[in-house]
Image (spheres, rainbow, N blue to C red):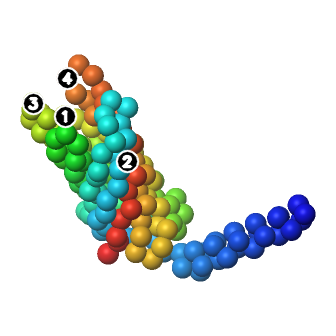
Amino acid sequence: MNHKLALLTTLTFSAIAAPAAAQAQTIPDYYVGAGVRAGFNDSTSFVLDSKAKVFDFDNIAGGTIGSVSVRPSVVFDSSTELRIPVSVDFILTENFYPYAGAGIAYNADGRSAVDAMITGGLDWSVARNVVLDLNASVLFKPGNTDTELTATVNYAF
């Protein structure tokens, strides 16, 4: 019985993984999408996410090893919050691009303040025009910090 379960599991995984491997794509320069934000000090919220490449940077041999991008997002909570980080994106594999950066966060929460932020995450190309963005950010507000995680599904073009 265990052998049948192992065989069924292997066949199922192969059927799922084979088309993804055959259609391996690189992360595109631009995307837009939506998802959720979960903060340690905030409620779960709806997020609109985007990415736009500014420029590539190359290694000594002339091959592209990464890029610089701007990653604006809007968080819809009890108030609207705008994030505008600039990131350095690195090539890990053909489908995985980690990134890190810094920027500003505008919080229209009654105090209308602009706060500094740092961000990092991973773009994962799960299909030809679909990118999953997993992100962690820390916002530096007066008197405290705010840590949040976002997960968005994006249409790449």
Q: Which mark is residue 150?
A: 2
Relative to 132, say whether 15 is above or below. Answer: below
Position of 145 with respect to 98 (left or right) is left
Position of 134 with respect to 5 (left or right) is left
Q: Which mark is residue 115?
A: 1
Q: Which residue is mark 4?
A: 142
Residue 6, given in percent of the width and then of the height, sits at: 83, 64
Relative to 116, say whether 154 is above or below. Answer: below
Whichever of callouts 4 and 1 sits on the residue coming sooner in the sequence is 1
Distance between mark 4 and mark 2 Cα atoms: 22 Å
Position of 110 with respect to 58 (left or right) is left
Relative to 102, say whether 23 is above or below. Answer: below
Residue 56, given in percent of the width and then of the height, sits at: 33, 64
Labels 1 & 2 near each other (Cβ < 8 A): no
Whichever of callouts 4 and 3 sits on the residue coming sooner in the sequence is 3
Whichever of callouts 4 and 2 sits on the residue coming sooner in the sequence is 4
Amino acid tagged 2: Thr
Labels 4 & 1 near each other (Cβ < 8 A): yes
Other residues around mark 2 within 10 Å, as few (<14) / some (14–19) / many (≥20): many
Other residues around mark 3 within 10 Å, as few (<14) / some (14–19) / many (≥20): few
Of tags 3 and 1, the one toward the viewer is 3
